[in-house]
Image (tube, grey):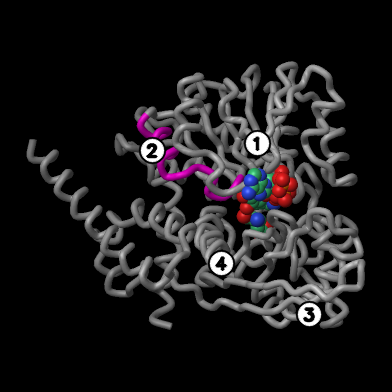
Amino acid sequence: MSTVIEQSHSTASCEAAVEAFMERVIAQNPGEKLFHQAVREGVRSVMPIVLANPIYRQHQILERMVVPDRVISFRVTWVDDRGQVQVNRGYRVQMNGAIGPYKGGLRFHPSVNVGTLKFLAFEQVLKNSLTTLPMGGAKGGSDFDPHGKSDGEIMRFCQSFMNELYQYIGPDIDVPAGDIGVGAREVGYLYGQYRKLTRRFNGVLTGKGINWGGSFLRPEATGYGAVYFAQEMLATRDLEIAGKVAAVSGSGNVAQYTAEKLIQLGAKVITLSDSDGTIVDMDGINEEKLAWVMELKNVRRGRIREYADKFKGAQFLPGKRPWGVPCDLAFPSATQNELDGPDARALVQNGCICVSEGANMPSTPEAIEVFLENKILYGPGKAANAGGVAVSGLEMSQNASCMRRSREEIDAQLRKIMKSIHDNCVKYGAEDGDGGCCKPKGFVNYLNGANVAGFIKVADAMVQQGVY
Ligand code: NDP
Ligand code: 2IT
């Protein structure tokens, strides 16, 4: 009885501390709703640790972690194919460098603003800490919309973007990579301009081409990693991927390689999507159909609705997301807040047992509550999608040592890292307290586990490095 009272008292004081903390964060970062959402989610998990460890309070660790080390903001001017001058905003948010050089992707999407990038950079700090590799957290990008632009326009934009960014990055300073709207083509143009400006060939970007410093498996790493993470979660309940029906959202880099690995492991992938809607193929998207999607998306840069014209059994649901389609496994792999409370309830009611987030913060707070209440396997993005940045970290170390590992070696390392992230989430997120065991008896709150494990490493590094 007394334990229960003590616990509920401490839960209440934790909640009060979170609310007081969030009040300040909201006042200091007005209007940045995605940043507030990401911070609240992280702080709710770590507040018990902060309250129990005076050293973190004494060093104001949480207060420091929500203020970026620096935010760089600049104008990007370029000329479109009609000869008209265009102006965009460019940014780099260097959030926290306590455990390594700043690391994180660049996003080109019209919705990008400082608040979006602060949310992504905050997530990246905890995610990079989880990977076991020495990387700080950053994110950057622009409100530039690559949709419908010619290769020449993309190239001129990337060159102008790099004309500013190059001053702030370097292989031991800050190492950008891809994210939404930034893939192999954009990284190529960015790298070319960096070389032109600096006369240096080094590992300043990851996701580079395989013949000029790129790592095997970087394109595949986020999607493959999200599936490996799901495999680990399923194994705690003696379940496996083979024979399961999977819903995947998005049809970009992460979605494509999530689907590829799921197919290889014997799952039936029945959906893909983009911002226009969802395709449902109850026969399953097999390897040939996926190869067609990759050509459609990566070469012709078309829309996913064309899938339903090409493959007659398939249906296109305009304006819809995949979550109403019955499935065992869900892989949200498009964007933030793409899966809300009603979507989560539909998934659970239809028998979904596992959600592994390829995207960053794709589930709303209400959706997460539904997953946790129903005790399904829920792998938050900062754990489940960390395979991408982990292989970026391996690309950095290959560049630094002027060598290249084989595809098989990188795949083995990726699997090992995803298992270690999983086991760390279990260690800090197992609700029955049997932390340290990767096959827990009780429910694992992977969200708490990921936030706490990621936080402790960064917090301790900050304490050890003093008040800087
Ligand atoms: P891509 O640009 O390759 O693909 C993005 C996909 O998501 C497209 O299908 C796009 O459709 C869709 N999408 C984007 N915005 C929206 C929106 N507002 N509503 C609906 N659909 C949308 O990006 P990635 O695959 O690289 O990134 C997907 C997610 O994974 C992002 O959350 C990213 O932060 C995260 N991530 C990416 C990593 C990587 O290595 N690339 C690593 C870890 C996480 P449309 O063409 O219609 O815009
Ligand atoms: O969100 C992410 O982890 C990424 N976009 C990948 C970052 C990276 O540096 O590889």
Where disc 1 sits, the SS reads loop
Q: Main secondary structure of the magenta part?
A: helix
Question: Please, what is the three-letter code of the amino acid marked with disc 3?
Answer: Asn
Place of residue 379 in the rendered image (x, y in percent of width and height, measured from the top left): 50, 39
* Quarter of the image with the N terminus in it: top left
Tell me the residue at 30%/57% (across/down).
47
The label shown at residue 163 is 3
Residue 407 seen by the camera: yes
Q: Is mark 4 within 8 Å of ligand 2?
A: no
Callout 4 crowding tier (Cα within 10 Å): few <14, some 14–19, many ≥20: many
Q: Are discs 3 and 2 less than 8 Å apart at CB?
A: no
The vertical placement of 345 against 53, above or below, is above
The residue under label 2 is 369
Question: Please, what is the three-letter code of the amino acid marked with disc 1?
Answer: Gly
Tell me the residue at 51%/26% (across/down).
347
First of labels 4, 1 by sequence position = 4
Near-viewer residue (195 or 363): 363
The quarter of the displayed image where residue 289 is located: top right
The residue under label 4 is 136
Place of residue 101 in the rendered image (x, y in percent of width and height, measured from the top left): 61, 71
Q: Quadrant of ligand 2?
A: bottom right
The residue under label 1 is 319
Place of residue 224 in the rendered image (x, y in percent of width and height, measured from the top left): 68, 39
> What span is in magenta?
359-373
Question: Please, what is the three-letter code of the amino acid marked with disc 2?
Answer: Glu
